[in-house]
Image (cartoon, rainbow, N blue to C red):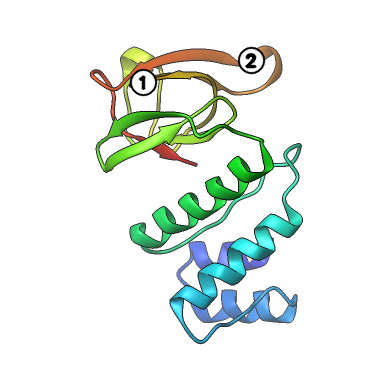
Amino acid sequence: MRDASMHLARGDVGKAIAAYDQAGMLQTAWSRDEAISSLIADWERNFDPAKPSLILAYLRRDVRALNELAREKLVARGLVSKGFTFVTEDGERRFAAGDRIVFLRNETALGIKNGMLARIVEASQGRVVAEIGEGASARQVEIDQRVYRNLDHG
């Protein structure tokens, strides 16, 4: 998969797809909805809360749909609660302790960089406390929607 990722980074999409196909990692579907359903089913079947996992999509609308469906599965399993409303730059989201989030804009005052991932440790209406990093280097940051709204499920 490292080779496929390098091909993508270089813009060699054809070679990347061929590498995924040769590794048995390429799946197809007849429609967008079928592809999303299949992806979420595979993710849920293999999901382990102790291991990191990513679901990637090209379009923001697909990312949003995948995040919502995956979060529904986590709520159904009791791994996160329904949570509290937080108004982001892209609309309302619900966040709860245990949710993984991604920061979408640098904010020096909070020590946040675009693309950083964190795990929510505390949530309330319009406010979250997120832990960035792991182990001894982990730190917590408090985020109020009135101050910083560039985050989403990660």
Of the pair 60 and 114, the residue shown nearer to us: 60
* Vertical arrangement, residue 116 with respect to residue 143, above or below: below
Can residue 42 be seen here? The reply is: yes
Residue at 26% across, 41% down: 91
Which quadrant of the view contains residue 150? top left
Residue 115 place in picture, x, y as percent: 43, 38
Question: For numbered disc 1, what is the local secondary structure?
Answer: loop
Q: Residues within 10 Å of mark 2 (few under 14, many from 20)?
A: few
Of 143 and 2, which appears nearest the observer?
143
Query: Could you say which quadrant of the image residue 78 lies in?
Result: top right
Q: Position of residue 35 (x, y in %)?
A: 53, 74
Kind of element beneath mark 2: helix
Viewer-side label of 2, 1: 1
Q: How many numbered discs, if any?
A: 2
The answer to which image quadrant residue 61 occupies is bottom left
- Name the residue: 60% across, 51% down: 54
The residue positioned farthest toward the bottom in the image shown: 30
- Left or right relative to 153: residue 107: left
Instruction: Say if residue 103 shows up in the picture.
Output: no
Up the image or down, 126 lies above or below 5; here it is above
Q: Mark 1: give few (<14), some (14-19) or many (20+) Cα within 10 Å.
A: some
Q: Residue at x 74, y 77 (%)?
A: 24
Nearest the camera: 69 or 129?
A: 69
Q: Amino acid at mark 1?
A: Gln
The N terminus: image quadrant: bottom right
Question: Residue 137, which numbered label?
Answer: 2
Query: Residue 33 placed where, x, y %?
Result: 46, 74
Residue 47 located left or right of residue 99: right
Q: Which residue is mark 1?
A: 125
Q: Which mark is residue 10?
A: none
Q: Sequence order check: which comes first, mark 2 or mark 1?
A: 1
Q: CA distance from mark 2 to mark 1?
A: 28 Å
